[in-house]
Amino acid sequence: MSVLAPARLRTAGRVPAGRRDVRWVCWFFPVWYAVFGVIICVLARVTPPPRPDVTAADKVAFFTANGSTIQIGFTALLILLGGAAVTNGLVGYHMSRMSVGPIFAYGYIGGMGVGALPGFLLVAVCFLTATFRTDRDPQITGLLYDLGMLSYNGSLGCFSAAYLVFAIAILYDKNEIFPRWFAYVTIWQIITEVIATQMFVAYSGPFAWNGSLAFWWSVVVFSLWLGALIVLLRGATAREVTEAPAEVTE
């Protein structure tokens, strides 16, 4: 007499696959920054930055010549700026997977959120206001020009807290979500932001808001940091362990 072997249930395994929603956001991350780069470089005209050592008449001429693209660019940015919250949320999500406490993820998201107010929103409002009425007093237009550029380029220190908690979390993390070397790259972000504070007293030269140290060095470091972050986020997403479906075999 044959006896049917009982069905055996194989326990669900755990495989590195990554969550589908996290993978989607991981692809959204570089797309959003690419669109952001086009807006600020081609349309909004804030990168490369206009010169700080110009007259009020030159500032008025800048807004007159670039008024249409500034309005298109910053209007688009105000619509799309919420995408930055999604990208920051992706970093915060992977930080929550670290062995450190969740306060680090909260600190990163909060610091990046606070930095967006003077770093992006204020310059958008200033430049849109300046182009809204080009016949206003040139001194007022010049004030909007200075306020917008100093806020955009000089408020980078608002992000320092976010970078600091990010670096500390990486160094203390035992789950190896991000490699330790990336913590030191992140610390360089803080250094460049400290250097950038000199633009509030420098009208020209390397420490002016368009200078080689206050601006361009920061751009190089940020570009390297961002490129590395995109690659590391994809790796962290792909390595994330998720529950595999249970398989029933006879």
Image (cartoon, helix red, strand yellow):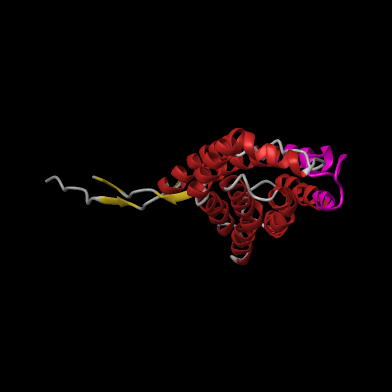
Horizontal side of residue 233 vs 60, given as left or right: left
Residue found at the very far left of the displayed protein: 1
Task: Note whether residue 17 is visible.
Answer: no
Q: Position of residue 10 (x, y in %)?
A: 33, 50
Task: Note whether residue 113 is visible.
Answer: yes
- State the image quarter where residue 114 is shown: bottom right
Decide: is 129 above or below 110.
above
Q: Main secondary structure of the magenta part?
A: helix
Whether the magenta-drawn stretch holds residue 218 is answered as yes
Name the residue nearer the viewer: 85 or 6.
85
What segment carries the magenta color?
195-222
Q: Residue at x 65, y 41 (%)?
A: 226
Q: Quadrant of the C terminus?
A: top left
Number of numbered callouts drawn: 0
Horizontal side of residue 242 vs 85, given as left or right: left
Name the residue nearer the viewer: 135 or 180.
135
- State the image quarter where residue 69 is shown: top right
Q: Position of residue 17 (x, y in %)?
A: 45, 43
Q: Residue at x 37, y 52 (%)?
A: 12
Horizontal side of residue 3 vs 87, given as left or right: left
- State the image quarter where residue 108 is shown: bottom right
Q: Residue at x 83, y 44 (%)?
A: 208
Name the residue nearer the viewer: 44 or 197.
44
Q: Position of residue 171 (x, y in %)?
A: 72, 55
Whether the magenta-drawn stretch holds residue 52 is answered as no
Q: Position of residue 152 (x, y in %)?
A: 69, 49
